[in-house]
Amino acid sequence: MDRSEMKMLDPIFAPGESKVAIATFPVRPAGLACAAELWLSRDGTTKDATSGAIPFTSTGVDQSISCPVTMPAGGYAYRALLDVTTDGIRIAVYEADEPVVVPWVGLPEITW
């Protein structure tokens, strides 16, 4: 299944910072038992950070799903991916058009 592009601002977060991403999308028909998982990855296959599967019941119209994520190690730009499933079957997969940047700054050395 090919990943569709989803819009996202280019966020910059600190390593270990906890954030809640809110994904808004419709699933039709209404009444399906679904789950959404937002995950960050350097390579597109390894889940460096994940919200875990967030269960919800489809409404047939736009609904917002909160996906809490703790930022992984710094020094990387992570791909933001969203998988939507029903009965354990992936029905939609998305990738953000901008990466999540978690910068890293080394220890400074100051001399006088």
Image (spheres, rainbow, N blue to C red):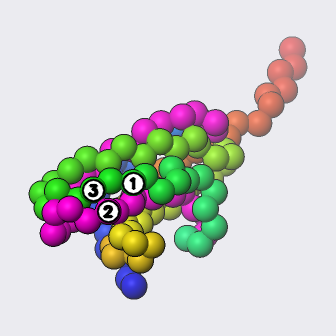
User: Residue 51 at what x, y percent from top left?
Assistant: 51, 50
Q: Is residue 28 magenta?
A: yes
Tell me if I can see residue 22 in this picture. yes
Task: Identify the residue shown where x is 33% and y is 76%.
Answer: 91
Front in this rendered view, residue 93 or 32: 32
Distance, label 1 to label 3, CA atoms, is 7 Å
User: Residue 89 at what x, y percent from top left?
Assistant: 41, 77
| Image position of 49 (left or right of 4) | right
- The residue that disc 3 covers is 57
User: Residue 96 at what x, y percent from top left?
Assistant: 38, 61
Of callouts 3 and 2, the N-terminal one: 2
Distance, label 3 to label 2, CA atoms, is 5 Å
Q: Residues within 10 Å of mark 2 (few under 14, many from 20)?
A: few
Front in this rendered view, residue 30 or 93: 30
Q: Is label 2 in contact with label 1 (beta carbons under 8 Å)? A: yes
- The residue that disc 2 covers is 33
| Image position of 83 (left or right of 40) | left
| Image position of 41 (left or right of 91) | right
Question: How many numbered discs?
Answer: 3
Amino acid under disc 3:
Thr
Q: Is residue 83 above or below residue 67?
A: below
Q: Is label 1 in contact with label 3 (beta carbons under 8 Å)? A: yes
Amino acid under disc 2:
Ala
* Figure quadrant of residue 48: bottom right
Instruction: Give the residues in magenta.
Output: 14-43
Q: Secondary structure at mark 1?
A: strand
Task: Identify the residue shown where x is 32% and y is 48%.
Answer: 65
Name the outermost residue toward the right: 111
